[in-house]
Image (cartoon, grey):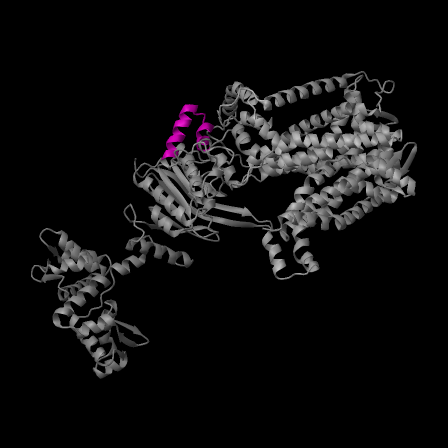
Amino acid sequence: MEQNTSLLTAERVVKTFPVSAGGEHTVLEEVSLNIVTGEVVALLGRSGSGKSTLLRILAGLVRPSAGRVLVKNTPLEGPNLGVAMVFQSFALLPWLTVQENAELGLFARGVAKNICEHEATLALSMVGLEGFEGAYPKELSGGMRQRVGFARAFVIKPDVLMMDEPFSALDVLTAENLRGEISDLWERGAFPAKSILLVTHNIEEAVLLADRVVVLGANPGCIRGEVKVDIPRPRDKKGARFIELVDYIYTVMTNPQAPVGELPSTDKSKRFPMLPHARVGGISGLLEIVNDRGGREDLPKLAESLRLEVDDLLPSVDASVLLGFAKVDHGDVTIVEAGKDFATAGVHRSHEIFREQLLQSVPFVNTVVQALRQKRDGRIGKDFLLDILDEHFSASEAERQFETLVDWGRYAQLFEYDADEERLYKTEDQSLHDDMTG
Amino acid sequence: MPTNFTQKFLGFSPQADVKRPALGLADVAIGLGTLTLLYLASRVGAESFVKFNPPDIIPAVDLNPWNLPNYAARSTLRMFIALGLSTVFTFVYAYSAARSAKAERLLIPLLDILQSIPVLGFLSITVTAFIALFRGSLLGLEAASIFAIFTGQAWNMTFSLYQSLRTIPRELDEMGTLYRLSKWERFTRLELPVSAIGLIWNGMMSFGGGWFFLAASEAISVLNHSYTLPGIGSYVAAAVTAKDLKALGWAIATMIVLILLIDQFFWKPLVTVADRYKLELSAGEERRFWVVDLWQSARLPRYAERLTQPLFRWLDRSLSKATAIPPKVRQKPTSPSGDRIYNVVLLLITVSLVVAAIRFVLAEVGIKEVGHAALLGLATGARVIALLVFSTLVWTPIGVAIGFSPKLARVSQPVVQILASFPANFIFPFATVGFIRFGISLNWGSMLLMALGAQWYLLFNVIGGAQAIPNDLREMAASIGLKKSRAWQALIAPGVFGSWVTGAITASGGAWNASIVSELVSWGPTTLKAKGLGAYISEATSAGDWPRIVLGVGLMSVFVVGLNRLVWRPLYDLAESKYRLG
């Protein structure tokens, strides 16, 4: 399948409807969208976002009030014959059998009878409906009806397969099942369409199926932005990245004012949290003091008793919070379970506790450890890591982040650092692997 | 018969090859039935070509009851020819209106007016025209009678089809467009099945109403001539002239048998078959009917089907190919200026027609006559309203009681259906005899006559409305212990309001139309007359007084349309917006 050929383009498409009270209601405002070969695009929006209208404009069923639609770079006038649609209500003809419903599109194109039958049988077997050819839709369950809808679309092998909330009329389990099968077909490369355009209000569905999620805003409908789904297929709904993307899109959808980023910002901050410039010694010292004073202390009071400014204490406090040793609210620092353990542990044990907390709280450390393990010589240059950090921090800050990272990593016995050679080394400790995998 | 026809026509039919005896009893029954039907149709049809040279030779109607089957058959043939014509008209008209926005703007208001025009007032015009057209044979009268029935059936059916075509579920319509169904396919696979149920039910109701026009049009005096067309309607007219109550009784019995037969052998099978065209996909209980079962258990139809199937398949494919949608369809944007010109032309034609009619009437009869006729119109209008109020008070509680009790509904629904189909003008003579004996003025009596035909629509619709009130709501009313009066006020009356409005619109239209035959009745030499627009039109028609015919019919149309616009439409909108259940 050739890549990146533009199949369907919307150029500044506007749709308005006259209102009975006079004037016009704008449903879509200057929407531009491009669909290329080999991708799955999801239009995600709440009701009133005009997502179904946009789909119908792209299908040539509805004329845009302004702007135009291009099919393979040719302006579209009238129904788009390069698409097939799967409808929310299935749109099956109850008086025709499953086979006749599936053949409908081919028969209309004047295809010979035996070819019609062959193609329909093939499509029906693709959706698991062998043996139901002679049944009438009302004899089938909801899920099976929608399978007929898919078969009917598959039969005509469209450039773009459009799906208008295809699973929303099904019960949860059936929808889940069918969604999975459609996803499988696409992943196997057996899908009889070059691209998929999906309209949905289900975030999980969008993230599961799509390569790009186009988020639409409502009243009037517009494109707020799009989110690339960079999760390799087959996708695991329990995967961290999956959950992260779903959470991000959920947040965006519930905040109509929030900007929609190309890559979720939560991603950056979680994988690259800013490490407070605190030495491990400072952190453990702070925790010991707080623990001695009953596990809870007022920050200004603590600073005063140590004859320090609050600002001087903050890096250690922030680091404790980041690593899950303490929490701060209303100016009080409170030590938590892990912090208490760390403050009271013996030397050997304290390394272990710190390692656990660090690996959990700072994903970038994981990346470094993984990289060390994968490299045959078990070493990484400082420049390599600085290059990554430079993406997220200024040059001087990247340098300081690196220093902190080395300090913490050394204490956690995750790696060693040779300052002369400017290289990180893998520690030889075998127990580490258990920690990583366990 | 319809099952296999549609199946073959649509090119799909379940191939059930069960081993059975080659020919069974069912086949004998079906074979004999078909042959009898063909024989009757050809014999009765031939009688229409007998010599007829008005006013010299007019076929007489013999009151001997043995002639009744023949008369009934001739009337039935007229009814079915009219139904066929109505169906063809319905498809052409409704299709044009639903397909083109321009045609729609002309056709739908026109249909609205046609529906409001008192058909019976036009008999004079049509009878004269058709007799002139078919000089020297009874065909002219036949055509006039068929046309009268047609005008009583066609508008309703057309509206039904138009509504169905306009309300095809959006996604199905889009599916048809995207999957490029040819025009033929779209019609046979999508539009015809979607409209089938509504069309058949409406056809059934209109057919029932058609008997009324049949009875009125078979014996008529127009332009000082009496015309008689042999049939069950003219038999009743002859019996009235001869004051023969026994003959009337026979006619009524024949009519009831006829209605039952047609119901069993025509409408019930159609309704049963139409059930498969239900849009909802829920697997409900399948409707069964013995005629359909008989047909399906016979081998004869299957043989015929096997023989003709290749032909139908071929026909289906070639028609589909011939009407295929070209791959590039250009949507022409509608030009606003062309639209405006079209609207202006329409308006001009309408205005000039109205002006011409007004000038004709004013020139011939003068303004005073118009005022007189308008007063008569008010009198008839008052009768229509009074009968509606009275029918509502009587039939709403009964209809609700029937609708709430499934058992009662099962028993009474066929009875009500027959009552609604039964031509009220068959009962008129009995009522007339009563009025004469008890000295009741037709000014009051005509209300009863009008109600005889019109009230059933109210009852019919109220039963339907009561059945549609969700059980949950009724249980709620019972569980919170609503008193009867309160339950009516809070639940039942609002619940049936929508159906009541639908019924009342039909009843009102029917009553206006019936006034033409209800305000002037006779028994032998005695003639009773009420003060009203119906009697006015009736008299003008017999006398061939054209200006008064135009004035009367025009005024009645104005009254009906006015009532529709000022009363029924607002009530209908209220029912749709406020009292809609579910």
Q: Residue at x 10, y 51 (%)?
A: A376
Find residue B318 and report its horizontal and vertical position in percent: 51, 22
Q: Is-magenta flag for residue A105?
A: yes
Q: Nearer the viewer, residue B225 or B298?
A: B298
Q: Is residue B437 visible?
A: yes
Find residue B559 and report its horizontal and vertical position in percent: 78, 43
Dominant secondary structure, magenta: helix
Find residue B445 and report its horizontal and vertical position in percent: 86, 43
Find residue B303 and report its horizontal and vertical position in percent: 54, 20
- In which quadrant will I find the N terminus of chain B? top right
Q: Is residue A349 above or below residue A137?
A: below
Q: Is residue B188 above or below residue B488?
A: above
Q: Is-magenta flag for residue B16?
A: no
Q: Nearer the viewer, residue A157 or A356?
A: A356
Which residues make up the magenta segment? A101-125
The quadrant where residue A120 appears: top left
